[in-house]
Amino acid sequence: EVEYQLGASMGLAAAVGGRVRYVKPHGALYNRIAVDAGLAGVVAAAVRAIDPGLVLLGLAGGAALEVAERAGLETAAEAFADRAYTPEGTLVPRGTDGAVLSDSAEIARRVVELVTTGRIGAIDGTLIDVDAGSVCLHGDTPGAVEMAKLLRARLDEAGVTVAPFLQD
């Protein structure tokens, strides 16, 4: 299924003059491959079979990145602006109170801390190390546009350069 979806996405992108440069599994698959090396290997093998030049974007510190690197794929580590973390560095399941963050000021503060120190507060208050080159803010989170504007302003104020994780 991953090969099929990736191939279809690449075909659609090509049909409109674009190209797929990286793969980011979504939702439950994304969260599962962050902790399940076996399934991460299946995903890495699928990406490699379709185009070994694609970058696999995954949760910073997760199994998927380690497995993909061993498979010879380039990887990019991602952190989340609007999601809470467990003390182990995984995302708090969405059904748990506090899993999805909605306070724009707090989200901005957390992301600035993350990108300037490499640490972020887990749901229990402990600080965890997160080495990420990309930050995701979900577009379907209520107020996402305002969150993104405030986040960008706070990053600019902190002197953080915002740039794509893939360069041409």
Image (cartoon, grey):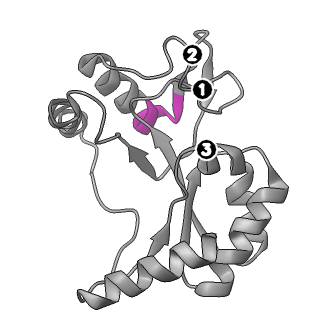
Q: Which of marks 2 and 3 is nearer the N terminus?
A: 3
Question: In front here: 51 or 106?
Answer: 51
Disc number placed over residue 70 in the picture, else none: none
| Magenta region, residue range | 114-119
Q: Residue beneath label 3, please?
A: 28
Closer to the camera in the image, 12 or 163: 12
User: What residue is shown with label 1?
Assistant: 93
Is residue 133 on the magenta stretch? Answer: no
Residue beneath disc 2:
96
**Displayed quadrant of residue 27:** top right
Prevailing secondary structure class for the magenta stretch in the rendered image: helix
26 and 109: which one is in front? 26
Inter-mark Cα distance, 2 to 1: 6 Å
Q: Dot 1: what SS?
A: loop
* Circles 2 and 1: CB atoms closer than 8 Å: yes
Residue 11 falls left or right of residue 132: left
The CA distance from mark 3 to mark 1 is 10 Å
Examine the rendered structure and indicate whether residue 24 appears above or below residue 11. Answer: above
Q: Is residue 101 left or right of residue 23?
A: left
Crowdedness of circle 1 by 10 Å Cα count: few (<14), some, many (20+)?
some
Query: Which quadrant does the N terminus fall into?
Result: bottom right
Picture quarter containing residue 2?
Answer: bottom right
Q: Please state which amino acid type lies under the numbered disc 2.
A: Thr
Question: Which amino acid, by three-letter code, is at mark 1?
Answer: Pro
Counting residues from the start of the chain, the first of labels 3 and 1 encountered is: 3
